[in-house]
Image: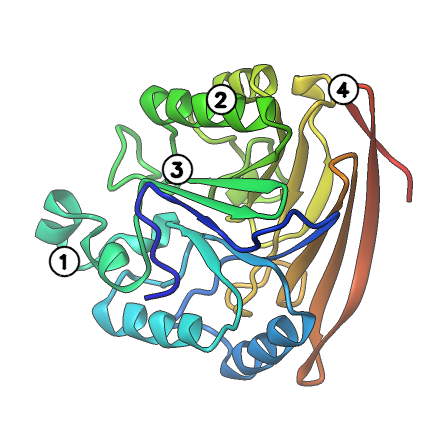
């Protein structure tokens, strides 16, 4: 399938464009999604003709087979290449043997490689990482964690690609900074360490989901070297004060990034907030 990537880089263009457009969607929650929002989302994404679609987890509500089948059909209706990472809802909830023995089997069958994906669009490289866990030694399993091993793998890739002049983004489900609601009460496990390594290795931005609210801005913990780009709940499920939405991330020349958020309203996705960030030296600054 066109959206399966297994530890390999795919290239979208033979020549490097000066502008790269990434559609960022997240938290579709098939099994509980708003069907009208999903239909409108397909039309909106395809009409934008992005170079890449980055999906930051929670394709399903309970990790059920039928939910993954619906998610797979949705992906097949999108016209651009896709990079997708799992979320905490993408392990089986009711099939506990499968959850603990093969937690990503359904994701990998219907969506793509679970642990690591790499996509190249022009001069931008996106590294997708799995921050979700089948379980953790705590009451709330929904908070994720990045393994030190996968952080080092991503850092090595980022260092190599940035040394070659590429702009490097990292995509994961869980946020690297605290958000305004319960879902954002904690950062992803090993998140601070990951940001430290990513800043050292030339990562420009992290794209995340999970909290069902959109936001964008430089991360102070990285001395503003890394942008945080947060997407809301694109499938319209479990909205937390914000309508279903997605982000359109435009990268120009590596030092200018704009994020336009679109939100579902009256059966269509309409323009919401927009942000423009420019990089001066090694630091990102909001310019609009």
What residue sits 65% from the left and 75% below the top? 44
**Residue 266 placement (x, y as % from top left):** 71, 84
Q: Disc 4, disc 2: CB below 8 Å? A: no
Q: Is residue 82 above or below residue 255?
A: below
- Element marked by disc 1: loop
Reading the image, the residue beneath label 3 is 131
Q: Earlier in the sequence, mark 4 or mark 2?
A: 2
Q: Quadrant of the C terminus?
A: top right
Q: Quadrant of residue 148?
A: top left
Q: CA distance from mark 4 to mark 1?
A: 47 Å
Q: Earlier in the sequence, mark 1 or mark 2?
A: 1
Q: Quadrant of residue 225?
A: top right
Of residue 240 and residue 244, the one placed in the foreground of this image is: 244
Left or right position of 64 against 61: left
Counting the numbered discs, the total is 4
Q: Disc 4, disc 1: CB below 8 Å? A: no
The mark closer to the camera, 4 or 3, is 4
Q: Quadrant of the N terminus?
A: bottom left
Number of the label disc, if any, that sits on residue 189:
none
Q: Disc 4, disc 3: CB below 8 Å? A: no
Q: CA distance from mark 4 to mark 2?
A: 18 Å
> Mark 2, residues whose alpha carbon is within 10 Å: few (<14), some, or many (≥20)?
many
Number of the label disc, if any, that sits on residue 282:
4
Q: Is residue 197 above or below residue 29?
A: above
Reading the image, the residue beneath label 1 is 95
Of residue 59 and residue 165, the one placed in the foreground of this image is: 165
Q: Is residue 52 above or below residue 276?
A: below
Number of the label disc, if any, that sits on residue 194:
2
What residue sits 22% from the left and 69% below the top? 65
């Amino acid at each position: 399938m066109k959206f399966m990537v297994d530890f390999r880089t795919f290239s979208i263009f033979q020549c490097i464009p000066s502008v790269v457009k990434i559609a960022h969607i997240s938290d579709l929650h098939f099994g509980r999604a708003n069907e009208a929002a999903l239909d409108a989302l397909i039309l909106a994404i395809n009409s934008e003709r992005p170079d890449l679609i980055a999906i930051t987890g929670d394709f399903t509500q309970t990790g059920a087979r039928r939910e993954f089948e619906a998610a797979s059909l949705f992906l097949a209706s999108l016209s651009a290449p896709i990079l997708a990472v799992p979320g905490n809802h993408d392990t089986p909830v009711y099939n506990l043997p499968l959850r603990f023995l093969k937690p990503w089997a359904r994701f990998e069958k219907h969506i793509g490689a679970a642990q690591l994906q790499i996509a190249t669009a022009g001069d931008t490289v996106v590294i997708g990482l799995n921050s979700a866990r089948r379980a953790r030694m705590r009451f709330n399993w929904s908070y994720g964690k990045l393994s030190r091993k996968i952080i080092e793998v991503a850092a090595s890739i980022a260092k190599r690609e940035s040394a070659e002049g590429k702009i490097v983004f990292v995509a994961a489900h869980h946020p690297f900074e605290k958000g305004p609601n319960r879902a954002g009460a904690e950062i992803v496990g090993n998140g601070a360490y990951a940001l430290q390594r990513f800043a050292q290795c030339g990562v420009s931005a992290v794209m995340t989901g999970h909290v069902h609210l959109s936001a964008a801005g430089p991360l102070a913990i990285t001395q503003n070297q890394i942008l945080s780009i947060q997407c809301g709940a694109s499938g319209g499920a479990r909205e937390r004060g914000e309508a279903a939405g997605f982000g359109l991330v435009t990268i120009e020349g590596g030092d200018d990034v704009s994020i336009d958020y679109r939100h579902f309203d009256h059966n269509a996705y309409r323009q919401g907030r927009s942000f423009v960030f420019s990089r001066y030296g090694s630091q990102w600054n909001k310019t609009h």
